[in-house]
Image: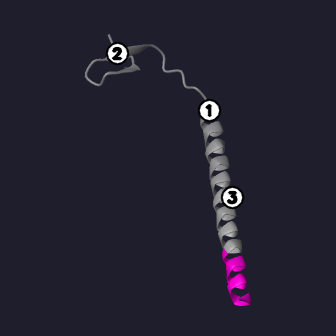
């Protein structure tokens, strides 16, 4: 009977360790994602000047400088 108890304890310890490592990995991944989000949020803003609607693309684009 003692070998069965030993295997049960080792199995439970292994399961607990597996869950702990999974939780730590998810926590680290969330921290890296938050850091990346903060870097994007603090990126400098470019001034594109006046914008005009590009009907073909369906987006606003910087107005082209007209020569003449």
Asked if the residues shown at circle 3 and circle 2 are in contact, with their CB atoms under 8 angstroms apart, the answer is no
The residue labelled by disc 3 is 24
| Residue 53 visible at all | yes
The residue labelled by disc 2 is 53
Q: Which mark is residue 59?
A: none
| Residue 43 visible at all | no
The answer to whether residue 58 is above or below residue 13 is above
Q: Residues within 10 Å of mark 3 (few under 14, many from 20)?
A: few
The residue labelled by disc 1 is 41
Residue placed most toward the observer, 50 or 26: 26
Mark 3 to mark 2: distance in Å?
A: 47 Å
Q: At which x and y percent is residue 34?
A: 65, 42
The structure residue drawn at horizontal position 45% and vertical position 13%, both measured from the top left corner, is 50
Quarter of image, res 63: top left
Q: Dot 3 lies on which element?
A: helix
Q: At which x and y percent is residue 2?
A: 74, 88
Quadrant in the picture for the C terminus: top left
Please indicate whether residue 45 sits to the left or right of residue 8 in the image: left
Q: Dot 1 lies on which element?
A: helix
The answer to which of marks 2 and 1 sits earlier in the sequence is 1
Give the main secondary structure of the magenta stretch: helix
The structure residue drawn at horizontal position 29% and vertical position 25%, both measured from the top left corner, is 57
Quarter of image, res 7: bottom right
Mark 1 to mark 3: distance in Å?
A: 26 Å
């Amino acid at each position: 009977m003692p070998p069965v108890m030993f295997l049960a304890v080792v199995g439970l310890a292994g399961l607990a360790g597996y869950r702990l490592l999974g939780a730590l990995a998810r926590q680290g991944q969330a921290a890296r994602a938050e850091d990346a989000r903060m870097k994007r949020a603090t990126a400098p803003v470019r001034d594109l000047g006046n914008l005009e609607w590009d009907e073909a693309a369906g987006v606003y684009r910087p107005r082209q400088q007209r020569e003449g």
